[in-house]
């Protein structure tokens, strides 16, 4: 006994062939590209890297170890080393709305959403500032 032949509409056949061709010809299109710091670095800031929670330290280039929770740092008018050090020293108020605090700096949350925040701290009386974004 033979299985019954299934007849497909010619449009469905063409669509299936196009999808198959795209999957074979462009396999990298299915994977997300690594983030490019030039695309998301705020204007006037220098990109200072991602904090690597898995291996410790900071990474200047994207790797799969950085996926998940992240912290990305930016500096303006200061070295990246100083910006990273200042980011480590940022604390938060003990009561809501949990404002960022850093001695000698005016810190402000620019944007906050579920599991995301963008924080900028400006040195009091100077043009030195750092910025960091956290999320997951």
Image (spheres, rainbow, N blue to C red):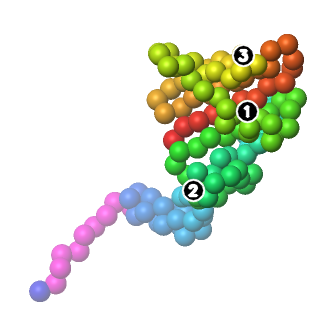
Residue at which label 3 appears: 106
Callout 1 secondary element: helix
Examine the rendering and report whether any part of residue 55 can be seen.
yes
Residue drawn at point x = 41 percent, y = 57 percent: 11
Q: How many marks?
A: 3
* Farthest top residue in view: 125
Res 77 → quadrant = top right
Coordinates of residue 132 in the picture (x, y in percent)? 67, 33
The tag earlier along the polypeptide, 3 or 2, is 2
Cα distance between the residues tagged 1 and 2: 21 Å
- At a point 48% along the width and 61% down the height, the residue shown is 19
First in sequence: mark 1 vs mark 2: 2
Find out whether the residues at labels 1 and 2 contact each other: C-beta distance under 8 Å: no
Which range is magenta? Answer: 2-10
The x, y position of residue 129, in whole percent, is: 79, 25
Q: Which picture quadrant has residue 86? A: top right
Looking at the image, which residue is at 54% across and 19% down?
Answer: 93
Task: Tell me where residue 105 appears, x and y as whole percent.
Answer: 74, 19
Circle number at residue 86: 1
Which of disc 1 and disc 3 is earlier in sequence?
Answer: 1
Q: Position of residue 82 (x, y in %)?
A: 80, 37
Q: Residue at x 61, y 58 (%)?
A: 55
> Circle 2 is placed at which residue position?
54
- Element assignment for label 2: loop
């Amino acid at each position: 006994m033979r299985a019954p032949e299934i007849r497909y509409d010619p449009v469905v056949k063409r669509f299936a062939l196009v999808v198959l061709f795209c999957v074979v010809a462009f396999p990298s299109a299915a994977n997300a590209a690594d983030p490019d710091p030039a695309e998301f670095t705020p204007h006037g800031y220098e990109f200072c890297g991602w904090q690597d929670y898995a291996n410790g330290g900071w990474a200047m280039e994207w790797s799969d170890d950085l996926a998940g929770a992240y912290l990305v740092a930016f500096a303006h008018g200061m070295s990246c080393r100083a910006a990273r050090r200042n980011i480590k020293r940022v604390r938060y108020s003990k009561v809501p709305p949990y404002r960022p605090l850093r001695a000698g700096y005016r810190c402000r949350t620019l944007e906050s959403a579920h599991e995301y925040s963008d924080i900028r701290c400006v040195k009091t009386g100077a043009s030195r500032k750092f910025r960091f974004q956290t999320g997951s």
